[in-house]
Amino acid sequence: MNLQDRVRVRKVTLLSDNWYTLKTTSFDWLRNDGQWQRMNRETYDRGNGATLLPYDLVRRTVLLTRQFRYPAFVNGCGDLLIEAAAGLLDDAEPEQRIRAEVEEELGYRLGPVRKIFECFMSPGSVTERLHFFVAPYDSSMRIGAGGGLAEEGEDIEVLELSIDDALARVADGRIADAKTVMLLLHAQLHVFGAAQR
Ligand SMILES: Nc1nc2c(ncn2[C@@H]2O[C@H](COP(=O)(O)OP(=O)(O)O[C@H]3O[C@H](CO)[C@@H](O)[C@H](O)[C@@H]3O)[C@@H](O)[C@H]2O)c(=O)[nH]1
Ligand SMILES: [Mg+2]
């Protein structure tokens, strides 16, 4: 049965329309046992995003960012967060947006990029679909210091790590951002791993 035939939306209420939007929706769901069940779910809509891991196969390095994330801080994170460069699409194409974001945050103008997958990062409450990319980089692509847009409150450090150091930080929890862990494990298996075989 088509999913559209299992959901009957009754009422959508806008709870917050400040920076992004938060809604609560009352709907009926047709359960597997054939019964209709009434539900309420909140959805936080901040649009879709893209993220990218630049890698250097010769030097066995990757480029990451380090920045303050208030929602992580308020949930007990006592350090700046190490993350892959990422940004919201603002209705642009994912590849075009992530290229611009890598220039702003990392200061590199990339050549070809490769899409690897797209994922819902928190599908119980956040609508966002995140597009994942990897791309080779080298020093000739560096066009600036990166750091993000200060006028938007971005205060980003650029971090170049060996892939082994980055993976060690995933293992001991110093890298704890989901998109970044996903990209690094992908790179271990399919980028650096493939290059060794
Ligand atoms: N004033 C204000 N500014 C905000 C607010 N929330 C975000 N911003 C600003 O909005 C901009 C968003 O920056 P981007 O680089 O486009 O996005 P991002 O925050 O890095 O998000 C990326 O990472 C997220 C977390 O991993 C991803 O969820 C997201 O898809 C994206 O890839 C930043 O300048 C940030 O300071 C807010 O509530 N108020
Ligand atoms: Mg960003």
Image (cartoon, grey):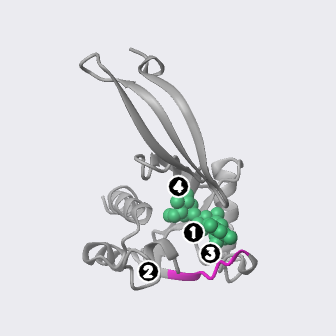
Query: Disc 2 vs disc 4: Cβ atoms closer than 8 Å?
Result: no
- Which numbered disc covers residue 161? 2
Residue identifier under label 1: 137
Q: Nearer the viewer, residue 140 or 25?
A: 25
Q: Nearer the viewer, residue 57 or 142?
A: 142
**SS for dot 3:** helix
Q: Looking at the image, is mark 1 or mark 3 nearer the viewer?
A: 3
Q: Looking at the image, is mark 4 or mark 1 nearer the viewer?
A: 4
Q: Is residue 154 magenta?
A: yes
Q: Could you tell me the amino acid type at mark 1? A: Tyr
Above or below for 56 versus 123: below
Query: Disc 2 vs disc 3: Cβ atoms closer than 8 Å?
Result: no
In-image side of 59 versus 76 (left or right): right
Q: Is residue 63 magenta?
A: no
Above or below for 151 versus 186: below
The N terminus lies in which quarter of the figure?
top left
Q: Earlier in the sequence, mark 4 or mark 3?
A: 3
Q: Is mark 3 within 8 Å of ligand 2?
A: no
Number of residues whose C-alpha sits closer than 10 Å to that of mark 4, classed few (under 14), some (14–19) or many (20 or more) = many
Q: How far, Cα to Cα, is label 2 from label 3?
A: 13 Å
Whole-percent x and y of residue 64?
50, 74
Residue identifier under label 3: 106
In-image side of 37 versus 56 (left or right): left
Q: How far, Cα to Cα, is label 4 from label 3?
A: 15 Å
Q: Could you tell me the amino acid type at mark 2? A: Leu
Residue identifier under label 4: 133
Q: Quadrant of ligand 1?
A: bottom right
Above or below for 128 versus 153: above
Residue interval drawn in magenta: 152-159
The residue under the point 44% across, 52% down is: 121
